[in-house]
């Protein structure tokens, strides 16, 4: 009996075991395969070993709140059928300052019930700039997307266009500046005015129709024109994926403007810094310097930036696109740690790069940063405000502004190395999981509890 059953049992035992052997082999192959360099989203082994928390990669932290575009401004609030006149917004500075002025101007035009003429981008020698609105943005798209919020026209009636607009300078106005009370009389009298919006105007006091126009115009209506967008896509595709876009600010003029003292800089950096300071930007000293630095007013150096990124668990093998202008000082302090760094000039043809205006270069950085896998800023300037807002519009939450204040306070308290790294981790983790990694206009974005 057993002699006849044995071949059958042996044959069917093999049939039953074969699938299991195959599954075990496949699992062993994948688990035992040698790994490539650490993933951008993986937790580095070294971080896991020394980590006081479960995961040391900042992007791996579970968020409890996020920001999304509010629904209330997605539908236009109709304007009265008649207009009070024409208004042209005059914008100054680099691309992101121009864009800030334009966004504010859209709200002002709606507030004054004016027809908006295409904005004027002022020629700025300091920014190596001579391009206009149409050289960067898609005019037809802008007009179409603002329809119903504010009326925008390419041309104005001949009898009005023959004269220069009456200029109203609002740039230096502070506090609660009332456009209706101060500017509307000039608009009604001259019918065609130009203005640059007040820099510190509080938009939370605007009526809802002006707020809605600001949100729509700033975050849904400004699209790069086809030529610039094509070049931006070319640049984006050339960057190895995944990648982090880093907006690093440590140029001589910016550091000089901060009036902060830095020790240990190279002689080349010191010479550039002294030239930028001139006679009007003396370095702060004593208690004033300590208070200023502890308020987070001093730009992070490239080496300090590298230290904080490591503290946040960002692998040193990460591909990093440097979204920055020319003239960064002490960059070796960053590239000695994060070696996989890419720039516009290293990825684009030399001839293309040399022909570009300053606004075009800034537009490329903006586009790449908005569409990057993650975005980190060392200073919350005009570009960072625009990029973080647009990434939020697109649902891209891996965005963080490094805290200069936290770094200054912890180093002033004597923390260094591992203690400082843990303190920086705790500070930024709290910001990130609570959705405070970037500041957003609260009238355009609403908090969502997760």
Image: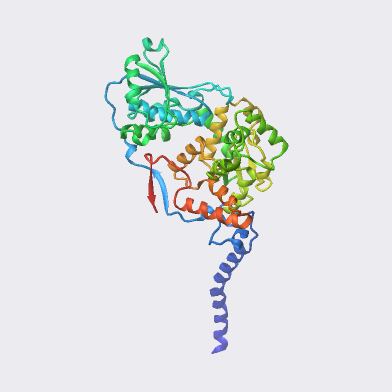
* Location of residue 164 with respect to 211 vertically, above or below: above
Q: Residue at x 69, y 40 (%)?
A: 265
Q: Residue lying furthest left in this view?
A: 81
Q: On the rendered structure, is 446 left or right of 430?
A: left
* Location of residue 449 with respect to 378 vertically, above or below: below
Q: Residue at x 37, y 12 (%)?
A: 160
Foreground residue among 10 and 352:
352
Q: Position of residue 318 (x, y in %)?
A: 61, 48
Foreground residue among 346 and 196:
196
How has the structure been colored for display? rainbow
Q: Position of residue 156 (x, y in %)?
A: 38, 16
Q: How many marks?
A: 0
Quadrant in the picture for the N terminus:
bottom right
Residue 373 visible in the shown view: no
Q: On the rendered structure, is 284 left or right of 193?
A: right
Foreground residue among 287 and 57:
287
Q: Position of residue 428 (x, y in %)?
A: 52, 51
Q: Residue lying furthest right in this view?
A: 267
Residue 232 visible in the shown view: yes
């Amino acid at each position: 009996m057993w002699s006849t059953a044995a071949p059958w049992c042996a044959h069917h035992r093999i049939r039953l075991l074969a699938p299991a052997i195959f599954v075990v082999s496949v699992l062993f192959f994948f688990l035992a395969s040698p790994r490539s360099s650490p993933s951008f989203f993986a937790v580095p082994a070294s971080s896991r070993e020394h980590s006081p928390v479960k995961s040391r990669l900042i992007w791996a932290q579970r968020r409890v709140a996020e920001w999304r575009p509010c629904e209330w401004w997605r539908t236009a609030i109709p304007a009265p059928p008649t207009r009070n006149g024409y208004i042209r917004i005059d914008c100054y500075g680099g691309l992101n300052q121009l864009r800030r002025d334009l966004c504010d101007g859209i709200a002002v035009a709606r507030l004054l019930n004016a027809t908006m003429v295409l904005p004027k981008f002022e020629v700025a020698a300091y920014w190596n700039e001579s391009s206009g609105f149409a050289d960067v943005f898609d005019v037809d798209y802008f007009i179409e997307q603002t329809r119903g919020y504010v009326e925008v026209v390419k041309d104005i009636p001949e009898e009005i266009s023959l004269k220069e607009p009456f200029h109203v300078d609002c740039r230096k106005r502070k506090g609660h500046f009332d456009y209706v009370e101060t500017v509307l009389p000039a608009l009604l009298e001259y019918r065609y005015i130009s203005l640059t919006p007040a820099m510190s105007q509080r938009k939370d006091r605007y009526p809802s129709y002006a707020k809605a126009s600001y949100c729509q115009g700033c975050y849904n209506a400004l699209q790069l024109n086809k030529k610039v967008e094509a070049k931006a896509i070319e640049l984006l595709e050339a960057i190895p994926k995944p990648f982090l876009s880093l907006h690093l600010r440590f140029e001589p003029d910016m550091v000089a403007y901060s009036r902060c003292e830095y020790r240990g800089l190279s002689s080349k950096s010191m010479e550039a810094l002294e030239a930028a300071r001139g006679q009007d930007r003396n370095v702060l000293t004593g208690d004033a310097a300590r208070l200023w630095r502890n308020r987070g007013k001093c730009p992070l150096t490239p080496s300090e930036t590298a230290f904080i990124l490591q503290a946040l668990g960002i692998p040193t093998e990460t591909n990093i696109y440097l979204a920055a202008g020319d003239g960064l000082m002490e960059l070796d302090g960053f590239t000695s740690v994060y070696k996989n760094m890419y720039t516009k000039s290293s990825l684009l043809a030399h001839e293309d790069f040399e022909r570009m205006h300053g606004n075009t270069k800034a537009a490329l950085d903006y586009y790449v940063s908005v569409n990057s896998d993650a975005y980190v800023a060392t200073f919350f300037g005009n570009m960072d405000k625009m990029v973080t807002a647009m990434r939020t519009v697109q649902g891209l939450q891996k965005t963080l502004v490094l805290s200069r204040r936290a770094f200054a306070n912890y180093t002033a308290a004597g923390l260094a190395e591992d203690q400082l790294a843990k303190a920086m981790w705790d500070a930024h983790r709290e910001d990130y999981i609570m959705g405070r990694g970037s500041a957003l206009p609260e009238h355009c974005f609403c908090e969502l509890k997760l």
